[in-house]
Image: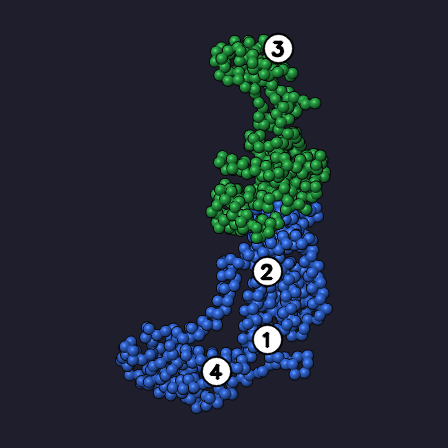
Chain colours: A blue, B green
């Protein structure tokens, strides 16, 4: 191909890129919005936390046994004094996030501290007919109490049958301005304090039993091939292959969809013949494919960059390596050209977007398959299903990125090379067939062709 | 003789069961302004698309500017019948895009676009989106896109369709200017009087077959009705009898408006018959009848060339 023809492909590619990616709609929808959403996800919890007031005040407890208040106040002290950052660390550790600096757990703990309760106490009252309860409720309306709890005596009696305990119900009266979250907190405190009071009534040491029942933590670490190369066992590991596949899906299908609509637009606007008077159909096809490849790359970089930034922030970089990323780029190219060839062929064969749905349905059925393969490939990335699907065009790039994302053992290099070779051959075949359809279809008007006619175009063009 | 700008030899094209073009031989000399005429479905657009290498021929050979049109796309300007614009693109960007595809360097395009838009009466539209323009304005922009790279060969498929008389006249002037600059122009049209006013060569096709291909001068001679039309101020019957007696006159007919139509013999001297009529009394008007391209078109399209039509003389030139 001469320099002049290559230059024309470049001009077409730049127009496609410019009029797709350098638009306000694209920049807002595909670049600014995801970045903004990611920012919001980080900021919103802190914003919400700053909006919540800690629970503070006195609860009036009507209890004939007098056991409840002691248990309640002990519980409040224990909860308030508990090292919440320890809780946060436990949650983060279970997720497999390496938060050695304590930044994340510290943040969560700070947020939890802000949103918990401050100085909640309980004051004991003996039941003295309905008058006490009525008076306390009136005082609660006036703001003297943050709640009035009426504890039936039967609720502490461990000798009662389960049914009797179930029937015994605590009445809790809250002022109408109490927030739902504060209502839940008060309710939770009362229920937990009741359990403590039951233990006390039975003469048991609650804290001792609680300690005995605490399940110890397990620090799972994956053994690497080499000694000492251990990595933490992350639950997030399962999300990596899904993330890889979705990234590929979003990047290729968004750009593929742009390719479809831009081809249909050129046909329906009748501008196609003007363009074809300056360039050949193959130059036009390649210009469009390459231009929208850049669009796809922008999407990939935006979303992939955000994902990598998130992974780096969570110190999970051991889930990714340079070689994994390089292979991901190779399979991104195979996936993009596969999708682009299909979309260009469909776009050139139809006159309107609605007509394209007929051809899109089978393509989507095939290409949605990788989503169904996420769990089995994630569980066993070197199993038979994973190996076979990663060699099977047109889904092979999606299956292979899931494998390389999920693999605790690296995917054998021969499989990567074979998959790449099959992918390249299938892309060449698809682009060749698409170019044959494109050459005939791009000037065709009227009724869209049947699948058999498309095959005839491929043979005859 | 120099090589024809367009040279078709035995070209044919079939779409499914429809034979769009059959055994078409056509030579368009360089520098000519050629009208490509024919009824709807005659095969004009198909022929033009084959000339542009947008579609392939089924058989025959086709040379444009001495080779394949694909190799000379930058030297050819083309306005298709089914034309459009990128609706969301600005007019300036659209012209710049097409100009760049046609090989014009970016630096010269800026002034070229501004000047050209002014020339076609659209000086303020460069920054507007194409969809903001009226259909006629869009058509002028499309025409400009076809010639922005100053091509040697310009092919226009129905350039006048959809244009109001003012814009049709503007386009007419622009085409004449381009022709005067030495460019070869081939355009198809249904507005036959436009072709008659502009072209030095006419090609007519019907049902994919060429039925006429000649210079306008030769066609006018070939389809000369050889008739004098005299409109006397006095009695048309007397004028009819006077002219009937002239040896050059073959027959006489008087129409409803009292005009005398004197059909001349093949070798007759028309000037002598006109002099006889002028001597025979006062006349409101006298003229030699002319065959318009519309009449030739209808004659050729509706009836085979070898047939005869009353009142329409077709001269075979030797």
Dot 3: few (<14), some (14–19), or many (≥20) neighbours within 10 Å? few
Q: Are marks 2 and 4 on the same chain?
A: yes
Dot 4: few (<14), some (14–19), or many (≥20) neighbours within 10 Å? some
Q: Earlier in the sequence, mark 1 or mark 4?
A: 4
Residue tagged 2 = A294
Q: Nearer the viewer, mark 3 or mark 4?
A: 3
Dot 2: few (<14), some (14–19), or many (≥20) neighbours within 10 Å? some
In the picture, which quadrant includes the C terminus of chain B?
top right
Q: Nearer the viewer, mark 3 or mark 2?
A: 3
Residue tagged 3 = B247
Q: Are marks 3 and 2 on the same chain?
A: no
Identify the secondary structure beneath mark 1: helix
Q: Position of residue A143 (x, y in %)?
A: 29, 78
Q: Position of residue B191 (x, y in %)?
A: 55, 32
Q: Earlier in the sequence, mark 2 or mark 4?
A: 4
Identify the secondary structure beneath mark 2: helix
Identify the secondary structure beneath mark 3: loop
Vertical placement of A58 versus B251: above or below?
Answer: below
Residue tagged 1 = A317
């Amino acid at each position: 191909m001469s320099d002049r023809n290559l230059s024309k492909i470049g001009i077409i590619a730049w127009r496609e890129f410019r009029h797709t990616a350098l638009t306000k709609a694209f920049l807002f929808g595909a670049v600014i919005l995801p970045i903004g959403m990611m920012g919001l996800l980080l900021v919103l919890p802190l914003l919400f936390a700053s909006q919540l007031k800690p629970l503070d005040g006195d609860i009036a407890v009507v209890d004939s046994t007098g056991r409840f208040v002691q248990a309640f106040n002990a519980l409040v002290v224990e909860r308030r004094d508990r090292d919440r950052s320890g809780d946060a660390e436990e949650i983060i550790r279970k997720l497999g996030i390496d938060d050695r600096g304590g930044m994340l757990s510290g943040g969560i703990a700070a947020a939890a501290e802000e949103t918990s309760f401050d100085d909640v106490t309980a004051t004991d009252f003996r039941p003295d007919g309905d008058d006490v309860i009525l008076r306390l409720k009136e005082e609660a309306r006036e703001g003297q109490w943050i709640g009035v709890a009426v504890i039936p005596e039967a609720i502490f009696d461990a000798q009662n049958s389960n049914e009797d305990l179930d029937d015994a119900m605590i009445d809790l009266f809250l002022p109408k301005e109490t927030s739902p979250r504060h209502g839940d907190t008060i309710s939770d405190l009362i229920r937990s304090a009741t359990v403590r009071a039951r233990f006390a009534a039975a003469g048991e040491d609650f804290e001792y039993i609680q300690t005995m029942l605490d399940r110890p933590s397990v620090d799972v670490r994956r053994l690497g091939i080499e000694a000492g190369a251990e990595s933490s066992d992350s639950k997030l590991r399962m999300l990596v292959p899904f993330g890889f596949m979705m990234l590929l899906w979003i990047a290729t299908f968004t750009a593929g969809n742009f390719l479809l609509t831009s081809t249909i637009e050129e046909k329906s606007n009748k501008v196609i013949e003007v363009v074809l008077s300056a360039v050949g159909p193959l130059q036009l096809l390649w210009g469009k494919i390459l231009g929208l490849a850049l669009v796809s790359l922008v999407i990939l970089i935006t979303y992939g960059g955000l994902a990598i930034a998130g992974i780096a922030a969570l110190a999970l970089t051991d889930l990714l390596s340079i070689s994994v990323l390089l292979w991901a780029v190779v399979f991104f190219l195979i996936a993009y050209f596969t999708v682009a060839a299909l979309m260009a062929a469909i776009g050139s064969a139809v006159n309107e977007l609605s007509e394209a749905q007929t051809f899109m349905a089978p393509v989507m059925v095939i290409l949605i398959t990788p989503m169904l393969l996420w769990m089995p490939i994630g569980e066993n990335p070197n199993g038979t299903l994973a190996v076979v699907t990663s060699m099977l065009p047109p889904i092979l790039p999606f299956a292979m990125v899931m494998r390389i994302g999920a693999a605790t053992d690296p995917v054998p290099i021969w499989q990567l090379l074979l998959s790449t070779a099959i992918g390249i051959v299938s892309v060449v075949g698809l682009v060749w067939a698409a170019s044959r359809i494109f050459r005939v279809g791009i000037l065709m008007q009227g009724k869209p062709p049947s699948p058999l006619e498309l095959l005839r175009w491929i043979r005859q063009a | 003789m120099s090589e024809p700008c367009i040279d078709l030899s035995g070209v044919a094209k079939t779409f499914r069961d429809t034979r769009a073009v059959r055994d078409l031989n056509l030579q368009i000399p360089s520098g000519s302004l050629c009208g490509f005429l024919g009824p709807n479905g005659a095969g004009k657009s198909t022929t033009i698309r084959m000339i542009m290498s947008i579609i392939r021929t089924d058989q025959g050979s086709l040379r444009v500017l001495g080779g394949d049109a694909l190799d000379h796309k930058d030297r050819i300007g083309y306005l298709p019948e089914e034309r459009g614009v990128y609706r969301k693109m600005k007019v300036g960007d659209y012209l710049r895009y097409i100009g760049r595809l046609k090989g014009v360097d970016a630096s010269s395009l800026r002034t070229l676009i501004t000047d050209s838009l002014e020339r076609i009466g659209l000086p303020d539209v460069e920054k507007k989106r194409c969809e903001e323009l009226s259909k006629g304005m869009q058509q002028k922009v499309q025409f400009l896109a076809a010639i922005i790279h100053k091509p040697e060969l310009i092919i226009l498929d129905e350039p006048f369709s959809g244009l109001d008389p003012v814009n049709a006249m503007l386009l007419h002037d622009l085409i004449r200017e381009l022709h005067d600059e030495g460019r070869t122009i081939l355009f198809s049209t249904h507005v036959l009087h436009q072709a008659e006013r502009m072209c030095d060569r006419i090609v007519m096709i019907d049902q994919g077959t060429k039925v006429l291909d000649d210079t306008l001068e030769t066609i006018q001679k070939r389809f000369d009705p050889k008739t004098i039309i005299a409109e006397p101020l006095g009695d048309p019957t007397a004028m009819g009898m006077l002219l009937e007696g002239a040896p050059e006159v073959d027959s006489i007919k008087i129409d409803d408006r009292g005009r005398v139509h004197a059909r001349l013999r093949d070798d007759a001297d028309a000037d002598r018959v006109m002099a006889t009529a002028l001597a025979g009394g006062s006349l409101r008007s006298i003229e030699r009848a002319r065959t318009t391209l519309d009449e030739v078109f209808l004659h050729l399209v509706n009836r085979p060339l070898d047939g005869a039509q009353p009142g329409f003389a077709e001269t075979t030139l030797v």
